Image (cartoon, rainbow, N blue to C red):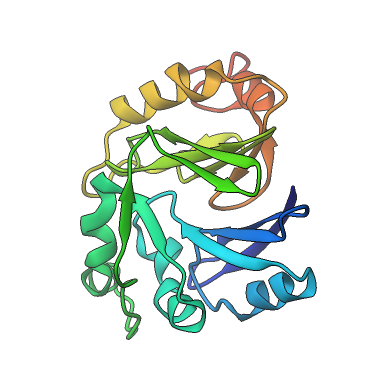
């Protein structure tokens, strides 16, 4: 599996490109800005974009997806509990003080934790991790976890937005993510790559060396 990172948009959220080399099929996780560089990369591998996945519905992770859909006609997926956020992208931007004419994705499809996505023979599993938003999820494929704004390098996502809950976030991390293998690589929605084992030891909220 090829994994490429693209910091995009108003606050540099990480978009991730996944390519199954054998099947020449691609997926993108969280398009928060201009999609062109990602599409150029897909073309350079001779791959075809199959779908766009979202870890959650905040503006900085979805605001490039309307244009990407228009260019590719691929489906956009989000957890059913965050559909309302994606549909209200203009209101989100207004509340955060951004003047922007970005439109929400169209014909958004929803999923639950029971769903599995596939690129060729590669499975992408859904882990529902509410707390940052009600429909926040992580995507697990092989040894790679795409954690959105649930888990960061030595930190966690904010819970002071509408629908946020630190109790839920804490449970999601401790009962779901920290039960994964320590060697799982974590690709967060912002900032640097980390691992489950590193966060279990050093995360400032939950790490065994930095517990508060």
Q: Residue 76, image x and y in percent? A: 40, 62
Identify which residue is drawn at 58% across, 58% down: 27
Q: Residue 166, image x and y in percent? A: 32, 31
Q: Quadrant of residue 186?
A: top right
**Vertical placement of residue 85 versus 113, above or below:** below
**Vertical placement of residue 178 versus 56, above or below:** above
Question: Left or right: where does residue 80 sit relative to residue 122?
Answer: left
**Vertical placement of residue 177 versus 128, above or below:** above
Identify which residue is drawn at 41% across, 72% down: 63
Q: Quadrant of residue 103?
A: bottom left
Observer-nearest of 83 and 45: 45
Observer-nearest of 125 and 162: 125
Identify which residue is drawn at 25% across, 75% down: 90
The mark total stands at: 0
**Vertical placement of residue 6 versus 152, above or below:** below
Q: Residue 141, image x and y in percent? A: 62, 38
């Amino acid at each position: 599996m090829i994994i490429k990172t693209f910091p995009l948009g108003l606050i540099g959220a990480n978009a991730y490109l996944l390519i199954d080399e054998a099947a020449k099929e691609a997926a993108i996780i969280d398009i928060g800005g201009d999609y062109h560089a990602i599409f150029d990369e897909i073309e350079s591998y001779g791959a075809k974009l199959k779908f766009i996945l979202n870890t959650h519905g905040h503006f900085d992770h979805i605001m490039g997806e309307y244009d990407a859909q228009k260019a590719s006609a691929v489906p956009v997926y989000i957890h059913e509990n965050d559909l309302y956020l994606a549909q209200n992208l203009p209101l989100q931007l207004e509340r955060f003080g951004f003047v922007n004419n970005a439109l929400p994705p169209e014909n958004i499809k929803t999923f639950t934790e029971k769903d599995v996505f596939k690129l060729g023979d590669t499975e992408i599993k859904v882990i529902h991790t509410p707390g940052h938003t009600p429909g926040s999820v992580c995507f697990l494929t092989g040894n790679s976890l795409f954690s959105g704004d649930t888990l960061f390098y030595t930190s966690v996502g904010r819970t002071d937005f509408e629908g946020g809950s630190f109790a839920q976030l804490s449970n999601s991390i401790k009962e779901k993510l920290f039960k994964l293998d320590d060697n799982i690589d974590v690709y967060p929605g912002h900032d640097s790559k980390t691992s489950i084992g590193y966060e279990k030891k050093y995360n400032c909220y939950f790490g065994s060396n930095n517990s508060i």
